[in-house]
Image (cartoon, rainbow, N blue to C red):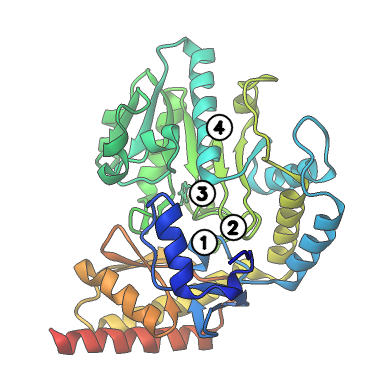
């Protein structure tokens, strides 16, 4: 059968094609997505799912937002790609908006999160070398971090399952094991050129870093003339109830990485830096074919407008509080629920080894979630979620936990 319309393929045909022709890198769940609308995804059979994961923090504005669809069609007809050899009107406009919002000076656009991290790592080494020569090359990263799958990003992603098959990795990376001020002080030396942190670890199980630890990170970077790199690829752009998660901690990084929800589903990432950081990259030092294309940048400009004009950041805080409150209430009735962590609409619920089973049962009931770090139910819903959506989700989770308690 010669067709590119997936709607004509059965689930079995889709599965068979992937099994035969794809590298077996993904363990997919039994959900065959056909279309989305608002906070819902519909499968091939027309079954509706409430999305509490938003494409892993990508679809913050839900599915098929009419303003994004309009931009997609209009710009698609005008210009999709032009390369970085030439100017397009939107890259500079978007850089200005992001720089002004974050307090950073300049932006480099990429296609993904991992590439934004690669750019940040190159900047870190260039900065260290410019300051003190080649010896200032050590990059500090945290235990259980996740920064991406390309070699540089993988080298600072300190999870054995991701790193083990691919060693040797990029040299001069050191791990901070102990998330205390003393632990951090011990890890620093004159050789450190950067400390990379996720203000809230995502893949690591939704773990907000302690405020005093973050503040010590800022002070130690200043003392040792190193760069504080905040990876906000998952937690940035409104997700935590502030535009950037670092704002919760009353500090500013030197380098900031963004991606995931930046163009709300169209691939776009960014590395932002302060003036002294930006001075480290000269013409020809770095580049990319696709990054910052006209369609991606125009979509991101629209995303920023929607978030501001529709007051979505306040809504994130409001819905996040409502969801956390419901989860806390449920925890009093289900002993399987451990710690409930997070900020805004980035929430993790510790449920131990049953996490994957809970995720599978929720999916069968029509709710999309995910298990982070194997033991944490991770919730990253679209910002457009309503209290009645949350009530529906909480009722389903309550049912699943009750069923599982009965079976034990
Ligand atoms: C997803 C993620 C990345 C990697 O982004 P990709 O677009 O998948 O390459 C890096 N850092 C964090 C914190 C992420 O959540």
Residue wearing tag 3: 232
Image quadrant of residue 106?
top right
Q: Which residue is mark 2?
A: 261
Choose mark 4 or mark 3, whichever is in front.
Answer: 4
Front in this rendered view, residue 297 or 328? 297
Q: Are marks 2 and 1 in contact (CB under 8 Å)?
A: yes
- The residue at label 4 has a CB less than 8 Å from ligand 1: no
Q: Earlier in the sequence, mark 4 or mark 3?
A: 4
Q: Are marks 3 and 1 in contact (CB under 8 Å)?
A: no
Quadrant in which residue 191 is drawn: top left
Report the Cα–Cα distance between label 2 and label 1: 6 Å
Ligand 1 closer than 8 Å to label 1 CB = yes
Categorize mark 4 by other alpha carbons within 10 Å: few (<14), some (14-19), many (20+): many
Near mark 3 (Cα within 10 A), the count class, few <14, some 14-19 or many ≥20, is many
Distance from the alpha carbon under mark 1 to that under mark 4 = 21 Å
Q: According to the image, label 1 marks what residue?
A: 57
Instruction: Give the quadrant of residue 342.
Output: bottom left
Q: Is 332 displayed left or right of 59 in the figure?
A: left
Relative placement, left or right, of 152 versus 39 is: left
Q: CA distance from mark 2 to mark 3?
A: 10 Å
Badge 4 is on which residue? 119
Q: Tell me: residue 91, above or below residue 14.
A: above
**Residue 155 % position (x, y):** 37, 33
Residue 9 in the figure: left or right of residue 217: right
Q: Residue at x 49, y 30 (%)?
A: 121
Does ligand 1 reach within 8 Å of label 3's beta carbon?
Answer: yes
| Residue 402 at x, y percent in the picture | 24, 89
Using the image as rendered, state which of residue 167 and residue 104 is in the foreground: 167
Helix, strand or loop at disc 3? loop
Residue 184 appears in view: no
| Disc 1 secondary structure class | helix
């Amino acid at each position: 059968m010669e067709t590119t319309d997936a709607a004509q393929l059965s689930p079995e045909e889709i599965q068979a094609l992937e099994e035969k022709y794809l590298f077996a890198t993904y363990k997919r769940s039994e959900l065959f997505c056909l279309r989305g609308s608002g906070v819902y995804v519909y499968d091939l059979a027309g079954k509706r799912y409430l999305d509490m994961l938003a494409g892993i923090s990508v679809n913050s504005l839900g599915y098929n937002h009419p303003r994004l669809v309009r931009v997609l069609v209009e710009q698609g007809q005008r210009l999709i790609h032009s390369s970085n050899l030439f100017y397009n009107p939107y890259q500079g406009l978007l850089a200005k908006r992001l720089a002004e919002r974050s307090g950073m000076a300049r932006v480099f656009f990429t296609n993904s999160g991992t590439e934004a991290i690669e750019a940040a790592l190159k900047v870190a080494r260039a900065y260290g070398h410019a300051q003190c020569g080649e010896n200032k090359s050590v990059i500090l990263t945290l235990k259980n971090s996740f920064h991406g799958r390309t070699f540089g990003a993988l080298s600072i992603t300190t999870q054995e399952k991701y790193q083990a098959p691919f060693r040797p990795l990029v040299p001069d990376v050191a791990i901070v094991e102990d998330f205390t001020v003393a632990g951090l002080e011990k890890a620093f030396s004159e050789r450190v050129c950067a400390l990379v942190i996720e203000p809230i670890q995502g893949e690591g199980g939704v773990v907000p870093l302690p405020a005093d630890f973050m503040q010590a990170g800022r002070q130690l970077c200043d003392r040792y003339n190193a760069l504080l790199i905040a990876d906000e690829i998952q937690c940035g752009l409104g997700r935590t109830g502030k535009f950037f998660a670092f704002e919760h901690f009353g500090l500013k990084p030197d380098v900031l990485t963004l991606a995931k929800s930046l163009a709300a589903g169209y691939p776009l990432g960014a590395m932002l830096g302060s003036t002294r950081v930006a001075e480290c990259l000269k013409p020809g030092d770095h580049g990319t074919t696709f990054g910052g294309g006209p369609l991606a940048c125009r979509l991101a400009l629209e995303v920023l407008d929607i978030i501001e004009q529709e007051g979505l950041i306040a809504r994130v805080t409001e819905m996040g509080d409502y969801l956390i409150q419901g989860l806390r209430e449920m925890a009093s009735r289900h002993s399987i629920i451990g710690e409930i962590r997070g900020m805004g609409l980035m929430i993790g619920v510790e449920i131990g080894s049953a996490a994957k089973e809970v995720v599978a049962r929720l999916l069968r009931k029509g709710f999309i979630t995910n298990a982070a770090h194997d033991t944490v139910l991770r919730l990253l819903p679209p910002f457009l979620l309503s209290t009645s959506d949350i009530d529906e989700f909480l009722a389903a989770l309550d049912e699943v936990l009750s069923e599982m308690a009965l079976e034990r």
